[in-house]
């Protein structure tokens, strides 16, 4: 966990990432799937926000939208902005609206992403060293040249493309022949950066890993390489899309330690996507819960886990098997997730919610702020009057649920 | 090498209640590794490498471990899907028969008395997998069923639910025609589905529903024992809760015995009465679930428990938690002695250190020494002669090992320096067995029985 | 996300199991129709199907469309007065060849031969290949090794050359072309189905069938074969076209009987005339071959796309 205090909440100028009213639709032969529906949230510099939800809730699509990675077609950014702010200069870029070359410059440099399956994210036909070199070459070519003792302004013709790892075989060999000393220095600079990045993630023998291919490494090692690659250029924001789901519990623990540690040292903000609520408790500052494409609850992680406000969050927590729960009595949420193709305007959870009332099937609940620094999208927290609806049609009203539920009581 | 379960304390055998549905003794499953043009066998993947286990009737035995530990293979061996390459698996032994089996198991055939021989062949014909009569085999098949992890993969995509669930009944000619259909509807309703699902294909269902179909199929023949191989690992948490509740309900209604295989500690803690922890093909620890969790008697169990993120507990400080180092070794050539020792945070010098372990640690701690080794002549896993690049390097290595206070250093019995050669001999350790260390509990860790328990040794790193 | 589809509902009255069985078969047919509809979504596939249908009609109605020549309908009737007639001359819509044989007649009756050729070869090779491949895959071990080495030997020789060699040895006749092609083509199916069966054998549903205790034959029949068969169907469809192509090549070289109303033979016969400006014999026969092969390839491709496991059973 980082050192951001919760009272910084209302300081609305100190944000790093702001997702504003994001909607992502997919055009399929069967209709338009509203995978992400008017989602808004914020990540502050150095904090960890956990985005939690089950299969199909839209969390992965949200994550990819931040880097504008959703393929269009069939995807379509129907509305909203994804704004990335530079904490130093205050400059803001809207990833969805900016031109592609700016987006590409930001990817890897200011926002980085690690994925669930490191095997798929690493190129199987390149050595680890080459892959990491590409990251440095793309974003830090100038730095490499300087480290090699070559003044970027006076750099010879081929050197820039060699440094940025874009030179083909011919150009590289030509550069090697004509400027042997500089070429070697450049290679040494690249290697040094790569080794630094690898050893920073706790990889014991970076040289050996550098010359290995992905298939020669274990799952945990590959995940470390991916983290090294992501953090190579010291991004402001790291998006982690279920990075440990495919790993064993003991390795997962070490990877989480690693991510935590790197965050402490570098002050990177992390957007952590997961379906596992128990992970969240360990390291997240804030928690946002998604259901059927919408954000249903958010707030400080420990608070939300201790006293969940939204019925879905409550159900989710109650469904997790624990030592204390009597066997056979896990609180299961009845029903299943609704179709997201051309859905009617209603609360998507209403068909499964024990509190649902008529108003819930006619209105889309908006995010209501609650103390302290929390939000819920549930009509129970809304006034009948503000919706223009009779009181009888509303679910039972609450202000803030201070639930001392079974899971909140430590065993 | 078989260990008979000794009776301790209050005289109860380690894990049995009235009788065991299945009893395993020193079961191994080795897959041969073939190399070369002529496909010569050069080694074996030791997926399951000597497991002793008893599955008590009417209870749930949880089997946990991480990927590659062999739990899935073990589950399939018990269900008869995969043949064991060594050891015995006994089905439906009552106490008396079990006692006979234990007694006669270690007796070579030649020295058996005629009476014993008859007893033994009777046991084999009626209870032993692989030598049972056809009739008994049918009984075994009908009573031992399997639920797969991936429900979608375990349902034939081209068959209707009606045919999938009714298949067991057809195979054993239990019912046909209308009777069959009625029975199938019955089964579907039992698992929370209905007659409207009869004429559908698997792809038309959600993950949770498919798992229900799979369970319905497993129950078709009214078995008494069901092996569940990670039945909820692929499901969302809310669906998992539904399925787990269903499984518990079925167990109560039908008096089922479960072998619940999973890697999820939260689930196994919730679902099982007894818990067996596996690592690299062997059982690390076994005992009642609550006790194993509360007071682990094997470092691996402790690490698992500590690594498991939990919604409970206030302590967020993990510095006291045990962690494993390194990565899972190759199952073709597992470590000698205790399988865990190269990675174990509390290993001692008696845990089975071998020459290869030294190379691993050298590689990371002093790569210079490691690079200076030019040749290794092994005479056994515990003794070797290292030829270094030069005398200086040999001397460095020699002094380093001599002065080492790590558990590895403590395992060195003899080390000699001769020019550029370093000869080293380590204490030879045999396979460390799974032994009872407390009433109802067994562990394969040397530290388990000791007064200090699982704690870093005095001469710690 | 999968949704349960409501395509068949069973109300409480029709819970009666006797009706279930007929309901079951109607559900299965509904599924097949669904698959068919999926296949026909691709316009190219539809074009292929249309062309094939036209050819089939042509073959079926050959005696109605033209008067069958006696004694051998597969020899074009010779109009000695009008040899090398251009299309449109004296009732010869597509012209005549250098022996006065009517080109249109040749095309129509040639379609029968093409159908005979492709159906015979494909069906026989399917049967043989499936049998051999199944035995190899289900038995495994040395039998598998041996059979697959045999298959490898066959596959090492290019199809056309191989068929050529066999047909040449057996002597020029249409029947021998069929035989030669059958000998060459069966290995492909053996290999395909062996691969598929091995893949299917490792699935959990086959394991589930074995846990239930079903016999190997039943498992093969109900679980393995139905799920292994798809690539075979695709390949068979494609081969319906390819067989005619290669068969035409063989008869072009002269391995068919002289003067046979077989498209390849016609291309060959008309070849010498091309330089003299008599393009119609070779061209029309060539177009027929092209259309036939194209149509089956389109349908085969469409089948492959529709039956791709990724999209199958959505």
Image: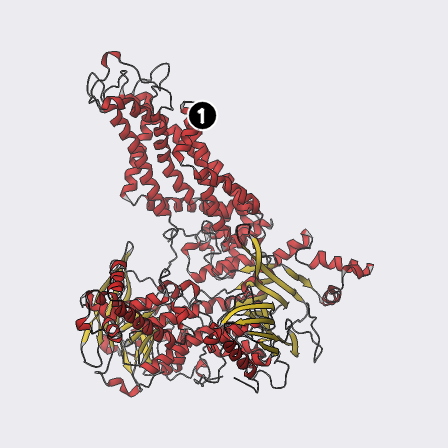
Work out whether B106 lies above or below B135: below
Q: Quadrant of the N terminus of chain B?
A: bottom right
| Picture coordinates of residue C110, whole percent (x, y) | 33, 25
What is the crowding at mark 1: few (fewer than 14 residues within 10 Å), some, or many (at least 20)? few
Give the colour scheme shown. secondary structure
Residue hosting label 1: C169
- Quadrant for residue A41, please give it: bottom left
Tally of numbered discs: 1
Q: Is residue A62 visible?
A: no
At numbered mark 1, what does the secondary structure look like: helix, strand or loop? helix
Q: Residue furthest right?
A: B114
Q: Closer to the camera, A219 or B460? A: B460
| Picture coordinates of residue C231, whole percent (x, y) | 41, 44
Work out whether C89 lies above or below B123: above
Residue ID at (29%, 25%): C267
Q: Closer to the camera, A101 or A279? A: A101
Residue ID at (31%, 21%): C64
In screen coordinates, is B1 left or right of A116? right
| Picture coordinates of residue B73, whole percent (x, y) | 56, 62
């Amino acid at each position: 966990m980082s050192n951001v205090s919760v009272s910084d909440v209302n300081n609305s100028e100190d944000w790093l990432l702001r997702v504003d009213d994001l909607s992502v639709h997919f055009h399929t032969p069967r209709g338009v799937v509203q995978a992400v529906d008017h989602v808004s949230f914020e990540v502050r510099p150095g904090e960890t926000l956990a985005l939690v939800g089950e299969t199909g809730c839209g969390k992965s699509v949200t994550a990819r939208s931040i880097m504008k990675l959703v393929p269009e077609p069939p995807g379509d950014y129907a509305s909203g902005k994804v704004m990335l702010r530079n904490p130093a200069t205050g400059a803001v870029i809207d990833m969805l609206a900016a031109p592609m070359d700016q987006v590409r410059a930001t990817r890897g440099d200011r926002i980085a992403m690690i994925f669930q399956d490191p095997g798929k994210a690493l190129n199987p036909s390149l050595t680890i060293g080459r892959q990491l070199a590409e990251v440095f070459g793309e974003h830090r070519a100038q730095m490499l040249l300087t480290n090699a003792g070559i003044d970027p302004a006076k750099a010879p013709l081929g050197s820039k493309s060699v440094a940025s790892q874009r030179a083909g075989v011919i150009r590289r060999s030509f550069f090697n022949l004509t400027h042997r000393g500089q070429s070697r220095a450049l290679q040494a600079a690249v290697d040094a950066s790569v080794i630094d990045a690898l050893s920073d993630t706790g990889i014991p023998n970076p040289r050996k890993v550098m010359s290995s291919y992905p298939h020669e490494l274990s799952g945990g090692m590959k995940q470390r390489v991916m983290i090294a690659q992501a953090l190579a250029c010291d991004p402001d924001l790291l998006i982690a899309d279920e990075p440990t789901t495919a790993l064993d519990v003991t390795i997962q623990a070490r990877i989480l330690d690693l991510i935590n540690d790197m965050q402490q040292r570098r002050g990177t903000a992390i957007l952590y996507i997961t379906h596992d609520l128990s992970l969240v408790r360990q390291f997240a500052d804030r928690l946002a819960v998604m259901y059927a494409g919408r954000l249903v609850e958010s707030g400080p992680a420990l608070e939300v886990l201790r006293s969940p406000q939204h019925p879905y969050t409550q159900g989710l927590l109650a469904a997790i098997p624990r030592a204390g729960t009597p066997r056979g009595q896990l609180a299961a949420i009845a029903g299943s997730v609704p179709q997201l193709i051309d859905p009617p305007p209603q609360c998507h959870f209403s068909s499964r919610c024990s509190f649902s009332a008529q108003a819930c099937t006619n209105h889309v609940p908006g995010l209501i702020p609650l103390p302290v620094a929390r939000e819920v999208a549930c009509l129970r927290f809304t006034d009948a009057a503000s919706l223009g609806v009779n009181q009888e049609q509303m679910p039972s009203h609450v202000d803030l649920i201070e639930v001392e539920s079974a899971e909140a009581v430590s065993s | 090498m078989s260990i008979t379960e000794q009776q301790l304390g209050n005289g109860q055998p380690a894990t049995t209640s009235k009788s065991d549905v299945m009893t395993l003794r020193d079961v191994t499953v080795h897959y041969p590794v073939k190399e070369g043009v002529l496909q010569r066998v050069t080694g074996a993947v030791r997926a399951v490498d000597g497991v002793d286990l008893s599955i008590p009737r009417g209870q749930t035995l949880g089997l946990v471990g991480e990927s590659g530990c062999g739990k899935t293979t073990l589950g399939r061996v018990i269900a008869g899907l995969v043949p064991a390459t060594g050891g015995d698996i006994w089905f439906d032994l009552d106490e008396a028969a079990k006692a006979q089996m234990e007694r006669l198991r270690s007796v070579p055939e030649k020295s058996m008395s005629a009476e014993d021989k008859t007893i033994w062949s009777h046991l084999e014909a009626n209870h032993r997998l692989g030598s049972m009569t056809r009739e008994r085999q049918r009984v075994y098949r009908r009573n031992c069923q399997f639920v797969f992890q991936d429900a979608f993969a375990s349902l034939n995509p081209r068959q209707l639910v009606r045919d999938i669930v009714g298949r067991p009944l057809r195979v054993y000619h239990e019912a046909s025609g209308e009777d069959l259909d009625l029975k199938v509807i019955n089964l579907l309703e039992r698992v929370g589905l209905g007659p409207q699902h009869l004429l559908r294909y698997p792809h038309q269902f959600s993950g949770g529903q498919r798992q229900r179909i799979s369970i319905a199929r497993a129950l078709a023949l009214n078995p008494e024992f069901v092996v569940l191989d990670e039945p909820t690992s692929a499901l969302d948490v809310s669906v998992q809760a539904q399925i787990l509740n269903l499984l518990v309900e079925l167990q109560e209604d039908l008096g089922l015995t479960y072998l619940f295989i999973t890697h999820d500690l939260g689930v196994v803690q919730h679902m099982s009465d007894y818990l067996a922890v596996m690592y690299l093909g062997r059982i690390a620890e076994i005992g009642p679930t609550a006790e194993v969790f509360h007071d682990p008697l094997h470092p691996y169990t402790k690490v698992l428990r500590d690594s498991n993120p939990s919604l409970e507990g206030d302590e967020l400080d993990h510095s006291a938690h045990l962690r494993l180092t390194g990565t899972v070794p190759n199952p073709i050539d597992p470590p000698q002695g205790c399988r865990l020792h190269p990675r174990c945070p509390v290993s001692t010098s008696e845990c089975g250190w071998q020459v290869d372990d030294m190379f691993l640690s050298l590689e990371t701690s002093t790569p210079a020494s490691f690079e200076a080794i030019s040749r290794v002549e092994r005479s056994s896993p515990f003794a070797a002669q290292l030829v270094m690049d030069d005398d200086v390097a040999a001397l460095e290595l020699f002094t380093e090992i001599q002065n080492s206070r790590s558990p590895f250093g403590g395992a060195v019995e003899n080390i000699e320096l001769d020019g550029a050669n370093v000869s080293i001999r380590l204490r030879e350790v045999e396979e460390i067995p799974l032994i009872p260390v407390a009433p109802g509990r067994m562990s394969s860790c040397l530290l388990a029985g000791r007064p200090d328990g699982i704690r870093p040794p005095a001469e710690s790193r | 996300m999968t949704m349960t589809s409501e395509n068949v509902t069973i109300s409480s009255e029709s819970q009666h199991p006797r009706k279930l069985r007929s309901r079951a078969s109607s559900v299965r047919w509904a599924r097949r129709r669904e698959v068919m509809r999926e296949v026909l979504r691709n316009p190219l596939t539809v074009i292929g199907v249309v062309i094939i249908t036209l050819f089939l009609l042509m073959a079926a109605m050959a005696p109605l469309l033209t008067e069958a020549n006696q004694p051998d309908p597969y020899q074009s009737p010779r109009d000695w007065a009008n040899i090398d007639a251009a299309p449109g001359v004296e009732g010869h819509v597509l012209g005549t060849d250098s022996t006065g044989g009517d080109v249109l007649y040749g095309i129509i009756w040639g379609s029968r031969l093409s159908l005979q050729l492709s159906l015979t070869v494909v069906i026989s090779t399917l049967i043989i290949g499936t049998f051999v491949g199944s035995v190899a895959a289900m038995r495994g071990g040395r039998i598998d090794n041996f059979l697959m080495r045999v298959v490898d030997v066959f596959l090492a020789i290019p199809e056309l050359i191989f068929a050529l060699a066999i047909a040449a040895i057996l002597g020029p006749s249409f029947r021998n072309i069929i035989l030669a092609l059958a000998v060459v083509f069966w290995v492909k199916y053996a290999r395909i189905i062996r691969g598929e069966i091995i893949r299917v054998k490792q699935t959990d549903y086959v394991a589930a069938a074995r846990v239930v205790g079903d016999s190997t034959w039943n498992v093969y029949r109900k679980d393995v074969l139905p799920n292994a068969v798809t690539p075979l169907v695709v390949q068979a469809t494609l081969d319906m076209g390819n067989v005619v192509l290669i068969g035409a090549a063989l008869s072009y070289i002269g391995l068919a009987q002289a003067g046979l109303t077989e498209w390849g033979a016609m291309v060959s016969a008309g070849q010498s005339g091309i330089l003299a400006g008599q393009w119609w014999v070779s061209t029309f026969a060539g177009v027929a071959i092209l259309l036939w092969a194209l149509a089956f390839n389109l349908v085969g491709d469409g089948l492959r796309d529709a039956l791709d496991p990724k999209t199958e059973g959505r």
